[in-house]
Image (cartoon, rainbow, N blue to C red):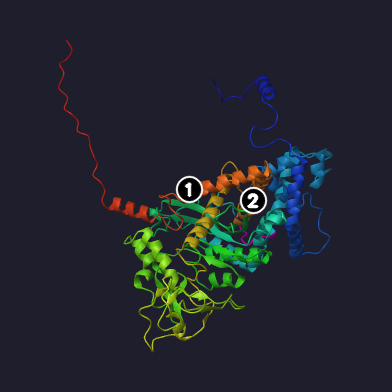
């Protein structure tokens, strides 16, 4: 059949009549006015549309009467974009135009300020709304964009440097603060939807984690140094099989060109039980992979505290407290009132610091006479010289040598600490402490080798306590004994919560934050706003699930469901072959290394020689 010539008019007419009107892709049914009003109220309660308009007025250089009124307001564009996110559609301006032209009732059009806006005396269709919506959205983006620039071709390095220089002159720092405020304020609007009776039960505990999201495009950044990427504010994320950054980029097992999305997720105050409130994303940040990781997390914790929420645990993996400078992360968070929970790298184990004669071992201060086998317990466990059971027993024994707080921290963060052999509840018996050497107490550990005279510091000579400043050992200090049962329960729960949330938001059937083809607007600012809206939708899904669970069935049925869920969680947690978040797959890595160093020779099956067969006939 020849298809190079146009079809006959009759054929086209038949095709036109047989194909149903409308489109085959996307959600194109009418959106209920109830849903439109809910999303509109969410945007209004966040205050971002009003604030963006105020910033536009503030940035306007000319103060004249201006041109014709805007056809589409900032509020309208944000609501339409949020509607697309809430129904898991692609976040395209074209889809926004379809909603405005085809999918809204008259009441919804009035709600969004689109009622009665005609074109040449006729009602506007979807294609007539595209450019008014495009301009409204990009006006809003320009107001909060710290990284503007041309993104229609591959720029040269010189063009990129000139763009960055121009940004600094245009007040990039101010607009970055605006962008962070807008995206976090969207999340705050979802937190305020939680009824006070449930919201008040959250103690401010958060776990932070970064997850890479790819930029839209086939190649990422072009090879060579003649041109940069169209998305030149993105960067490469590379990891080897151990999830470490490889020295040679060619040996990376995972390679993604995009951005890091840092999320802070609410965690359960009591990990041994089920939460009594929904665990939502409370803060968000956006950065180039491998850069500003610490600044992003710190900014989120500061944002949550500034919004009036309580402060509690600040949990993160080794990329945060273990990898940060204390002036950049630990001290600012402790000044806000957060308690840091972390894991440690191999080079941070054992005795690393101390104060007033006490030694700091994996974040806690201990008696200087603690036996060497207890000091090196975690090092020995990771090296494989002792097993996990022995390690846990030694961690329990360590506890008896640990300094105890005498009081709560003061306004500067300093806290009075007591020798383990002094005061009520003493856990050690030391010859340097007169009252500790009375009747034999099997619950106390005996100190056999106290520091000799002339080498004793104030922890051994002060009869009451020693005031430890917040700066002492701040790099590795932790508010709970590392490796203890409590630490294990809390740390594993918090890390599992944030990793579960990352997977929840990457579900391609819903938010799909790691699917770049659904968010094609250019620029890191547009991408940050779109990702924030997708995370808001994830929060709304969690809120709906929490509401449905709380209202489904009788109170007795609710208690039964909770008990079953808790039992399942405990069973999974207590599995013998379970790999915990802090294990870093040590055993698996060692097995992989051993297998790689001693590859097994290929096994070949011996083939039996076939006897020649006589030719036929």
Q: Residue at x 69, y 48 (%)?
A: 82
Residue 119 shows up from this direction: no
Determine which of the numbered discs, if any, sits on residue 539 in the image.
Answer: 2
**611 vs 556: above or below:** above
Q: Dot 1, crowdedness within 10 Å: few (<14), some or many (≥20)?
A: few
**Callout 1 touching callout 2 (CB < 8 Å):** no
**Residue 1 shown in magenta:** no
Most foreground residue, 522 or 367: 367
Please state if 88 lies on the left or on the right of 220 as rendered: right
Residue 498: % across, % down: 55, 54
Residue 425: % across, % down: 50, 74
Residue at which label 1 appears: 572
**395 vs 220: above or below:** below
Report the residue that reaches farthest toward the front: 439
Q: Residue at x 76, y 51 (%)?
A: 41
Q: Residue at x 70, y 31 (%)?
A: 22
Span highlighted in magenta in the image: 143-150
Residue 216: % across, % down: 55, 48
């Amino acid at each position: 059949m020849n298809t190079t010539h146009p079809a006959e008019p009759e054929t086209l007419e038949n095709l036109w009549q047989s194909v149903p009107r409308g489109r085959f892709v996307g959600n194109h049914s009418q959106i209920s006015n109830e849903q439109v009003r809910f999303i509109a109220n969410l945007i209004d309660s966040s205050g971002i549309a009003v604030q963006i308009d105020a910033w536009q007025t503030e940035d306007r250089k000319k103060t004249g009467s201006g041109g014709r009124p805007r056809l589409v307001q900032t509020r309208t564009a944000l609501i339409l974009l949020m509607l697309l996110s809430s129904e898991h559609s692609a976040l395209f301006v074209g889809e926004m135009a379809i909603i405005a032209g085809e999918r809204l009732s008259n009441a919804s059009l009035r709600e969004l300020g689109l009622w009665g806006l005609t074109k040449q005396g006729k009602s506007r269709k979807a294609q007539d709304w595209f450019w008014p919506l495009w301009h409204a959205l990009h006006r809003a983006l320009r107001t909060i964009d710290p990284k503007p620039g041309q993104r229609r071709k591959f720029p040269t390095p010189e063009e990129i440097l000139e763009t960055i220089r121009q940004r600094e002159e245009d007040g990039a720092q101010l607009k970055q603060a605006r962008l962070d405020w807008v995206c976090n304020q969207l999340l705050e609007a979802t937190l305020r939807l939680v009824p006070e009776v449930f919201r008040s039960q959250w103690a401010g505990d958060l776990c932070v984690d970064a997850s890479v999201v790819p930029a839209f495009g086939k190649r990422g950044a072009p090879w060579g140094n003649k041109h940069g990427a169209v998305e030149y504010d993105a960067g490469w994320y590379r990891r080897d099989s151990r999830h470490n950054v490889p020295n040679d980029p060619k040996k990376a097992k995972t390679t993604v060109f995009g951005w890091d999305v840092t999320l802070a997720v609410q965690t359960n105050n009591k990990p041994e039980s089920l939460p009594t409130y929904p665990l939502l994303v409370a803060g968000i940040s956006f950065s180039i992979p491998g850069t500003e990781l610490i600044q992003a997390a710190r900014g989120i914790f500061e944002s949550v505290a500034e919004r009036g929420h309580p402060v509690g645990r600040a949990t993160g993996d080794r990329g945060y407290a273990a990898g940060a400078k204390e002036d950049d992360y630990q001290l600012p968070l402790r000044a806000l009132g957060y308690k840091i929970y972390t894991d440690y790298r191999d080079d941070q184990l054992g005795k690393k610091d101390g104060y007033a004669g006490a030694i700091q071992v994996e974040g806690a201060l201990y008696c200087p006479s603690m036996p060497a086998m207890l000091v090196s317990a975690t090092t020995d466990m990771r090296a494989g010289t002792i097993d996990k059971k022995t390690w846990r027993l030694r961690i329990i024994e360590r506890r008896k040598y640990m300094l105890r707080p005498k009081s709560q921290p003061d306004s500067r963060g300093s806290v009075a600490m007591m020798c383990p052999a002094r005061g009520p509840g003493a856990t050690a018996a030391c010859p340097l402490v007169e009252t500790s050497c009375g009747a034999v107490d099997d619950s106390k550990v005996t100190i056999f080798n106290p520091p000799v005279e002339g080498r004793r510091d104030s922890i051994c000579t002060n009869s009451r306590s020693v005031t430890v400043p917040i700066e002492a050992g701040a790099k590795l200090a932790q508010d709970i004994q590392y490796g203890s049962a409590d630490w294990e329960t809390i740390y594993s729960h918090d890390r599992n919560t944030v990793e579960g949330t990352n997977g929840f938001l990457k579900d391609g059937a819903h938010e799909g934050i790691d699917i770049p083809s659904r968010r094609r607007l250019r620029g890191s600012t547009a991408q940050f706003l779109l990702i924030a809206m997708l995370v808001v939708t994830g929060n709304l899904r969690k809120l709906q699930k929490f509401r449905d669970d709380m209202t489904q069935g009788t109170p007795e049925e609710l208690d039964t469901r909770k008990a079953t869920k808790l039992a399942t969680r405990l069973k999974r947690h207590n599995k013998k072959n379970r790999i915990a978040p802090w294990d870093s797959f040590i055993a698996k890595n060692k097995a992989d290394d051993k297998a790689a160093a001693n590859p097994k020779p290929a096994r070949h099956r011996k083939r039996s020689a076939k006897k020649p067969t006589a030719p036929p006939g």
